Amino acid sequence: MSTENTQDRARYVMRPPVDVFESEDGLRLVVDLPGVPKDGLELNFDQGLLGLVARRPLGEGDDAPFAEFRRRFELPRWIDGDKSTARLEAGVLTVELPKADAARPRQIQVSFD
Amino acid sequence: MLFRLDDLDHTFQVMNDLHRRLDRALGAAGLADVPRASELGWVDLTETPDELVLRADLPGVDADALDISLKEEVLTLTAQRRVEVPEGHKVHVRERRPYKFTRSFALPTRVDPEKVGARLRDGVLTVRLAKAEAVKPRQITLAD
């Protein structure tokens, strides 16, 4: 899916609502994307930026115009973008962004001689 | 002293930092002015010669948290959405809202109650209601 070629079919652009949660393992982003099919989703992780573009068709067929959800997040350095996973279910996108190993809390074993 | 100022500052610093990062990222992307998608289901009601079509944005709403009923020419939609903090997580940003609402729509024409279909897909509800035969447009042919 090329942004350049399809730009003129984007009828309007919206900023979707998002929840951001943090656990010991990493960050979880939850985004409302109603009407977006799996092949309409584009997630890019580049230089600490997570870019989200999601296209919602506004009609039938390949040439149908669409609405676009766009949002971009600057992520903390301790996120390991290569290990991120995403799932889209019932119009809700969930992205798991694990912490880099160095950033995880770890148990220090202390021993006494 | 009831609390240590240091603790409090630190608590909010983490949160504020993330907010600042998000805002800065949005500003950099030129998206600060982009309209927010609605928090509570947008509804479209459209009409073709043969049917009425209602579409509602209901991301994250389960089929069993949805109730659709038709009585006379009024279509009523009840939907509930829960938005929970996952276990063991703390909250940085919370924009997605839980809701429970009921909306009723007076339909502009009579419909056939036997020909109503509803589908929930990708977080969008589509209800199709076939118009009653009596109100469908009819082609009139001229007699010779």
Image (tube, coloured by chain):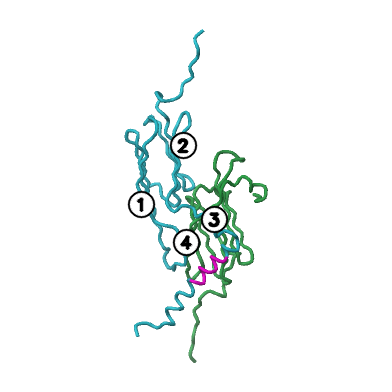
- The disc at residue A111 is none
Label 4 Cα neighbours within 10 Å, binned few <14 / some 14-19 / many ≥20? some
The green-tinted chain is A
Labels 4, 3: front one: 3
Say the numbered circle drawn on residue B46.
2
Which residue is at a point 46% across and 45% down the rendered structure image? B124
Is disc 4 in contact with disc 1, using a CB cutoff of under 8 Å? no
Amino acid type at circle 1 is Lys
Q: Does the magenta stretch include residue A10?
A: no
> Disc 2 to disc 3, how far (Cα)?
26 Å
Q: How far is the residue under mark 2 from the one under mark 1?
A: 24 Å
The tag earlier along the polypeptide, 2 or 3, is 3
Q: Residue B34 carries which label?
A: 3
Q: Which one is in front, A80 or B94?
A: B94
Q: Circle 3 marks a residue in which chain?
A: B
- Residue ID for mark 1: B100
Q: Mark 4 points at which residue?
A: A19
Q: The cyan chain is which one?
A: B
